[in-house]
Amino acid sequence: MIANMQYGWTFFVNPMQERHGWDRAAIQVAFSIFIVTETWLVPVEGWFVDKYGPRIVVLFGGVFCGLAWVLNSYATSLTTLYIAAALGGIGAGAVYGTCVGNSLKWFPDRRGLAAGITAAGFGAGSALTVIPIQNMIKNQGYEAAFFYFGLGQGIVITVLALFLMAPKKAQIAAVAAKVAASVKQSVREFTPKEMLTTPLFWVMYAMFVMMAAGGLMATAQLGPIAKDFGIADIPVSLIGITLPALTFAAAIDRVLNGLTRPFFGWVSDQIGRENTMFVAFAIEGVGIYALSVLGQNPVMFVILTGLVFFAWGEIYSLFPAMCGDAFGSKFATTNAGLLYTAKGTAALIVPFTSIITTMTGSWHAVFIIAAALNIIAAVMALAVLKPLASSHGKRARAQGATKPVAAE
């Protein structure tokens, strides 16, 4: 129910620009505000979850999510749009961070798969609403789409929040020992403060920023990219379906962005987080570069954006799972939330992609930069992250034998 707030945004950019005459880069500042508030406040929300449980935090988030899009529907100034973006980010972060953190606690034996399935809701949640949102924007205006979808999404979140609960120690004690041999887990619980002092956390943070930047650019700018390529409304026929290129790409992208999270999460439970990162990140880099070269062909645009989203979405299962492995379950929601702020840092780059495109006259430079960041992150997964995680684990085991687990 929060998926449209990020992945549906691209459909509103051009209509808002046409209605109000706002600069595209200025509109995308709202997207950056949404991502920053969605991510940077997750550690605070995670602290509340670890202390008071998930239910109240998600209830709070649902109200803010609904309010944000209702405000968007009435926004006649960029200031109102930015305020709504901040409210939406706070609400979406409360929902997403809580649900992922809670899954890390419930399933310590399959963290990659559990985080992946949970994150898949965010990645694929907008797949079924791509066409309805576009139709409502076309027939009733973007304001109506903001209003009705925002209200509906907010109501569903608040209702579902009532069913959330955190696991008790007795409920997870039995499964904690069933961890796959390929995934090393910390024998002691790191507090958020302790985690922030480790080199491992900051290497993971840097890699998360590098990977998130390219994907967020594609998420926010998919509509404008398709328009600038001149292929947005060209019909594309694949797998027995014919749709306009942008609509087709958006629908497939959402599905693959969801499927990749449990898939690569499951793979990482089997072969290790770093090995999986190398494969996925390398595919992402190649996919983004290919999109820059071949994306003006409508069929290739649909196929390659699908590949890009498939190889990008897994960061939202791999990084939280590795965070739980390295720093323990007890403070998993807060610790994973601190790592998740890397997405907010990456979002600050998104408005600059519009500026770079305006300066250079094409998207090519933006694609090359994004592809390079992905390839660098792929190499770092094996050359830097893997040995660092191994040495961190050895130190944690040595400390676990002499140092008590952090107090309640």
Image: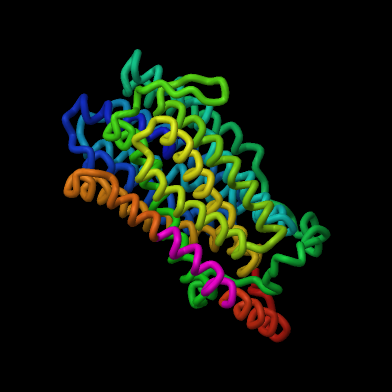
Depicted 54 relative to depicted 162: above or below:
below
The magenta stretch spans residue 381: yes
Depicted 137 relative to depicted 189: above or below:
above
In this orientation, which residue lies closer to the viewer: 262 or 345? Answer: 262
Horizontally, residue 359 falls left or right of residue 199, namely left
Can you give x and y, in whole percent of width and height, for residue 336 in the image? 54, 59
Can you give x and y, in whole percent of width and height, for residue 13 in the image? 29, 33
Can you give x and y, in whole percent of width and height, for residue 276 in the image? 61, 59
Can you give x and y, in whole percent of width and height, for residue 219 in the image? 40, 41
| Residue 180 visible, this angle | yes
Depicted 298 relative to depicted 340: above or below:
above
Q: Magenta stretch: dominant SS?
A: helix
Horizontally, residue 9 falls left or right of residue 306, namely left
Q: Magenta span covers which residues?
A: 373-387
| Residue 2 visible, this angle | no
- Location of residue 291 (image quadrant): top left
Depicted 133 relative to depicted 195: above or below:
above
Horizontally, residue 173 falls left or right of residue 231, namely right
In this orientation, which residue lies closer to the viewer: 168 or 18? Answer: 18
Horizontally, residue 180 falls left or right of residue 134, namely right
